[in-house]
Image (tube, rainbow, N blue to C red):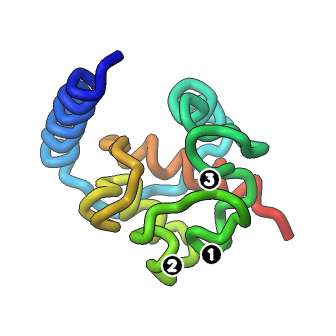
Amino acid sequence: MTLPLVAALTTSLLTAAGLAIAQSGGGAPAAGDPVAGEELFLDHCVICHIAEGGGQGPSLNGLYGRKAGSIPGFAYSAAVRDSGLTWSGPQLDRFLTNPIQALPGTAMPILVADPKDRSDLIAYFASKKIP
């Protein structure tokens, strides 16, 4: 796939997802279902992120409660690396709603428009917290 085609597809996805977010009304996430979150993760997120690392994106295993941009050896964007964030429920909800708006300069282009999907993913990430 050529770079212009990838850029056009990403722009289309971001536009469609942004419209879905605007129509959903946003709002705080409800208590999530980690089993449903795992299904979402396996269906959509493993394209870039694999739980144990080695993917195009950083490992999400142990993401909840971890400082953003802190996995040694992964080339994070400066936006994530220098954010000072620790991934909590509210931080993840804001980021997943619109990563590029939440952390301008992030390499994460995918939005999760549905508040229930976000809360399910967050519940799954919380269930994978490493002590």
- Left or right: residue 54 versus residue 10 is right
Q: Quadrant of residue 114?
A: top left
Task: Identify the residue position indicated by label 1 in the image.
Answer: 67
Picture quarter with the C terminus: bottom right
Q: Amino acid at mark 1?
A: Lys
Name the foreground residue: 29 vs 81. 81
Mark 3 falls on what kind of element? Answer: helix
Q: CA distance from mark 2 to mark 3?
A: 18 Å
Task: Identify the residue position indicated by label 2 in the image.
Answer: 85
Tell me what residue is drawn at x 76 percent, y 61 percent. Answer: 129
Rendering coords of residue 68 (x, y %): 57, 70
- Left or right: residue 40 versus residue 113 is right
Q: Earlier in the sequence, mark 2 or mark 3?
A: 2
- Left or right: residue 84 versus residue 102 is right
The label number, if any, that marks residue 123 in the structure image: 3
Q: Residue furthest top?
A: 1
Name the foreground residue: 44 vs 8. 8
Rendering coords of residue 94 (x, y %): 36, 64
Q: Amino acid at mark 2?
A: Leu
